[in-house]
Amino acid sequence: MSIKFKILLPTIPLVLLIGCGGYLLLSGQFDELRTSYAEMLVGDAARTLEQNTEEAAVRAQEEAALFSRMPAVIEAFTLAHQGNINDESDPVVQSAREGLRLALASTMAGYSETLGSKLQLHFHLPNARSLARMWREKQAKRNGNWVDISDDISSFRKTVIDVNRDGQPRRGIEPGRGGFAIRGLVAVKDAAGNRLGSVEVLKSYGDVFKLFQDEEGSYYTLYMNSSLLPTTTNLQDPAKYPLVDDAFVRVAGKENAQLDGAVTADLLRRAEDGRYVAIVGDFAVAYLPVKDYQGKNIGVITLARDISLQNAILDSASVLVLVLFGLAVVVPLLTLLVVLRYAVFRPLDRIRALAERRVPSPGPHPRPGRGRLARQPGRGRARGLQGRDRLHPPFGEPHPGDPERAHRRL
């Protein structure tokens, strides 16, 4: 393995680990930022809705209080008590009803002319029967016909029962035959403080959604618990008011196919424990519990805001971060390669080349002067032996330069 790979091998995983870890960490921060913005956006809308609901209930109660001591109202209730208030068709009670309509005709007309809608003013007898619905000409519909009677509302109007039981005012949301309504109730008392019945002003629950109805990119839907269908008789048509898993009824809303399709009964049930926020595509959706005047869950509201612009900004930022982390991985590696090439490997190559020129490496070619000896090994050896004999003759032989030895040899 070359030195280059020995250096890069531990470096590449380290750089990738740091880069990927940093990207994942920052991506998590972007997701938290997206969620926080969604919660802030729809959270403000939810608080506005809750505030509008409470303000509507307070106004309803204040308006009802205006009639609780009015002489014409006390007179009508006193007359009704002279008849049989348990008989829905009692003529004395009918006279009291007609007297109320006559006495308050100018007040009702002035309200309608000024505000463009009828004041939904309702008087109740102490036995939880309706005395007069002032915005109608007649009281109730029976077999397709309108009749003027004191119909019994005790089975579903708990606020009326409570106010007539203890004389304390009530306000809040309570379902009726037409669905949810914001109500304010006050006891009707005579000058001696005797409770004669109660008076109520209703506000449409749909009014609190007007802010979202006309706002572009905002959507809302009201879901009612299906257990209330026996009470809300006007909402029993599944074609107009579809069921969600037989647990909730879609009562009203500003339609959006994507949002409506994403709603399930489980998500709605989760809201019964408290408000929460979810992100559905390019929408931030808040699920809000709807509670009646007693604090019991009776439905769920979904509020949605378009956050496609914010998502696009965060997505662009995520891509930019990914590119930057990619550069953070690639640039150091390329820099390391360049540094190794020009600052390490090239100087090493020059040093090695210089060393090879000064100290030739052994090879198949002999050094100068040794070739002839190598080619004539026998001849060289013979010459060496002859020289040795001249200097040192063999034992018993006279030295060539010694005359005595030469004569002795002769």
Image: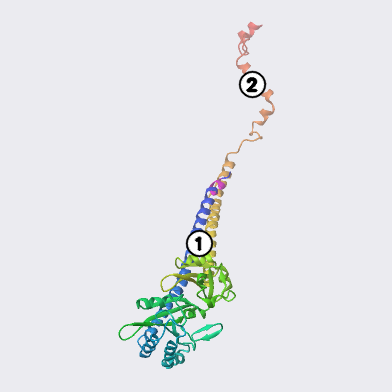
Instruction: Name the spot of residue 251 as percent of width and height, x first.
Output: 53, 75
Where is mark 2, residue-wise? 384
- Tell me the magenta residue range: 3-8
Q: Amino acid at mark 1?
A: Ser
Q: Can residue 325 be spotted in the picture?
A: yes
Q: Nearer the viewer, residue 28 or 276?
A: 276
Quadrant of residue 404 within the rendered picture: top right
Query: How many residues crowd around disc 2 within 10 Å: few (fewer than 14), some, or many (20 or more)?
Result: few
Instruction: Name the spot of residue 274 as percent of width and height, x first.
Output: 44, 67
Where is mark 1, residue-wise? 27
| Quadrant showing the C terminus | top right
Residue displayed at 37% across by 90% down: 72
The label number, if any, that marks residue 401 in the structure image: none
Q: Residue lying farthest left? A: 192
Q: Can residue 253 be spotted in the picture?
A: no
Residue displayed at 59% across by 41% down: 356
Query: How many residues crowd around disc 1 within 10 Å: few (fewer than 14), some, or many (20 or more)?
Result: some
Whichever of callouts 2 and 1 sits on the residue coming sooner in the sequence is: 1
